[in-house]
Image (cartoon, grey):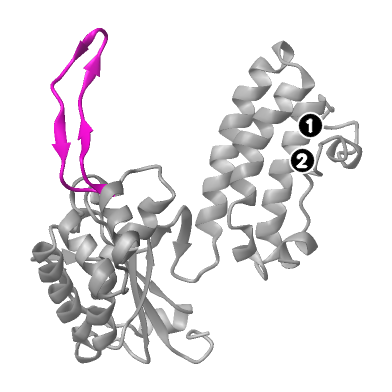
Amino acid sequence: MAADSGQTSILILLDLSAAFDTQVRHDILLSRMENMLGISGTALQWFKSYLTDREEFVSLGNSRSSSALVTQGVPQGSVLGPLLFCIYMLPLSHIILSYGLGYHFYADDTQLYFSVKSGTSSELSQLTTCLSEMNTWMEQNSLKLNCNKTELLQIGTKVQLNKMSSFPVYLGGDLIRPASTAKNLGVIFDSSLSYSAHINHIKKLSYFHLHNISRVHSFLSFSNAEKLVHAFITSHIDYCNSLLAGAPSNLISQLQLIQNSAARVLTRTSHSSEHITPSCSAFTGSLCLTESNIKSY
């Protein structure tokens, strides 16, 4: 939408070091739940009981270390883990909004974004100032930003990107340089949002797994081979594929070719003499992908 209105968007993907493990102080988290969300009484005591008095140890063979009390972090793999971390990060949203920037939190994944008409340093200086204040806040709350893994992506049309002047964005004294692509929650974004880099990544990964599956296919039942195809091929194609709505047909066709190859491997259909459509229908749940299916999302 910003590109259509002649603007260039700036996306910052922040990386937090071992956020779930060591950087969530229980006393601060419980204080936020009580003072910012109004949780009290039995509910607050339940959360306190859930978080505190946990112990950890290292076990190797028949040997085991002594136990140590866990005073920080939220339990990984739990349903509450991401939610509790978001609660811990709540005050950070006020800092971001005070600079007029957009943000998105997903567990420990933190993103900033905003759009500008041109790329002068004066218009973008607020970003560096905001990042500096965020870094200070995180240090005060036992969180640590990983500057080396933080990414910056400029998004817009080719004409808009060419008009963008270079600008320095610093985080903790380190310069963040604009990247051509960035991985956003498992999806590779590029500067034009064409998703061509993402599809190329899916192609490389899928054909690698297809090659390995074809080598052991003769030792597998059809059911087990189908499970492997769905686990290693279909899962990657299906992930966030609604983002591809409106993508050029030449990109969508590349995904179709992957599934055609998967169908041929699974059903042992010849690459030259037989049409692939009957093979596609052999998959349970209909593996075949079409442009209309993607756009229906």
Quarter of the image containing the C terminus? bottom right
Between 151 and 208, the one lying in front of the other is 151
Q: Which amino acid does label 2 sit on?
A: Asn
Q: Where 132 sits versus 66, above or below?
A: below
Q: Where is residue 39 in the image (x, y as percent from the top left)?
A: 32, 69
Tag 1's secondary structure?
helix
Q: Residue 264 carries which label?
A: 1
Name which residue lies at 45% across and 78% down.
156
Tag 2's secondary structure?
helix
Q: Where 108 sits versus 53, above or below?
A: below
Name which residue lies at 58% across and 30% down.
209
Between 297 and 93, the one lying in front of the other is 93
Q: Position of residue 18 (x, y in %)?
A: 23, 47
Q: Which mark is residue 260?
A: 2
Q: Is residue 80 found left or right of 172 in the rendered image?
A: right
Residue range of the region highlighted in magenta in the rendering: 51-73
Q: Is residue 226 found left or right of 62 in the rendered image?
A: right
Exactly how many numbered labels are in the figure?
2
Q: Is residue 32 found left or right of 42 in the rendered image?
A: left
Q: In the rendered image, is residue 55 in sight?
A: yes
Name which residue lies at 24% across and 90% down.
123
Instruction: Give neighbour class at mark 2: few <14, some 14-19, many 20+ (Cα, 10 Å).
Output: many
**Which residue is most to the top?**
62
- Please report contact status of discs 2 and 1: CB closer than 8 Å, yes or no: yes
